Image (cartoon, rainbow, N blue to C red):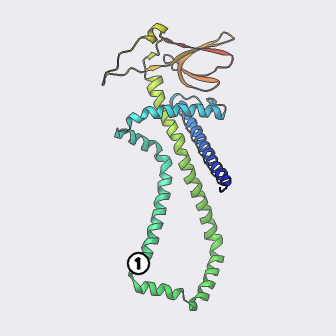
Amino acid sequence: MPDTTPVRKFSSTKVLTVFLSISSAAVIVLALLGYGVALSAEASFGIPHSVIFNSTSDLLTLGGWAVIQMVLILNKLSEWGFYVKIWEATWPATKIALVIMAALVALGGIAFATQYLLRRWPWLRRAVEQLRGSTHKKVLAIASFLIFVLAAPLVVMPLTMLAILIGIMFLVSLLSIVPIAGLQAGKAHIDDWVVGPEFCVPLQSRHARLQVKPPVKDGSPKIKVSTCVTVKKTSGTEYRGRVVFSTFNAVVLYDPEAGSVRRVSTEDASLEVIDKL
């Protein structure tokens, strides 16, 4: 029987490489979404986004909030206004990318048109072939060398730097789309589940949770509620508010009456869910 061990090892290694690549890309995207969520807290309440997270793990946790909100937004895919908002939000970032793509399409069109004209107009094709002939090669070589020597300092280097700058701007524009998506998802979460609701999540006893709930009728209004907590420090200090976002060791609380927002560390503290502030 033929030995297939090397093939199996190669296949396993390839699958593992692909899996690690996808996992790394997913972590980067989730972290960028989390950064956008932190920006949404600053945009909505003015709290500096840099104090909301302390590590990459916090960014990944914040990214989870964005993913959950995006899943809820799937219900709005049939609404035209949803796409208008997405376009307006991403337009500052995608404007540069669209300009670069339009320039590439224009260059491709010019190249295609040149080839088309060479096929359609025999006299133009003959003229090009004569320029490429042996009698003109030396002249063209000398002219090209002189043009390169004279134009390199004035044209080639600036164009090279411009191309590098455009490439960097194009990459940054594409990468900025992900934080902008996280920013919009975070703002939607704040509007729908933090500021918008009038009540906190009601507390339910074991008996109430075991009761069979009647099915929700189609078209009936859905009442949204906020998650309200109290954080009690070992020093005796107590903080109450609606949960905006939370990470591994902190929670951002919003007081709807005073309008204040604070980041409260959950280290050496107990957290309790309450139904009234």
Q: Which residue is mark 1?
A: 117
Task: Name the foreground residue: 262 vs 251.
Answer: 251
One can see residue 186 in this view: no
Question: Residue 255: x and y, percent?
Answer: 52, 18
Question: Residue at horizontal 57%, vertical 52%?
Answer: 171
Question: Residue 235: x and y, percent?
Answer: 69, 11
Look at label 1 and name its amino acid.
Leu
Q: Quadrant of residue 4?
A: bottom right
Q: Using residue 211 as the reference point, say whether residue 131 is left or right of it.
A: right
Question: Residue at horizontal 47%, vertical 20%?
Answer: 226
Within 10 Å of the Cα at label 1, are there few (<14), some (14-19), or many (20+) other Cα atoms?
few
Question: Residue 201: x and y, percent?
Answer: 47, 16
Question: Residue at horizontal 44%, vertical 76%?
Answer: 115
On the rendered image, what quadrant is the N terminus found in?
A: bottom right
One can see residue 161 in this view: yes
Question: Residue 140: x and y, percent?
Answer: 59, 85
Residue at disc 1, secondary structure: helix
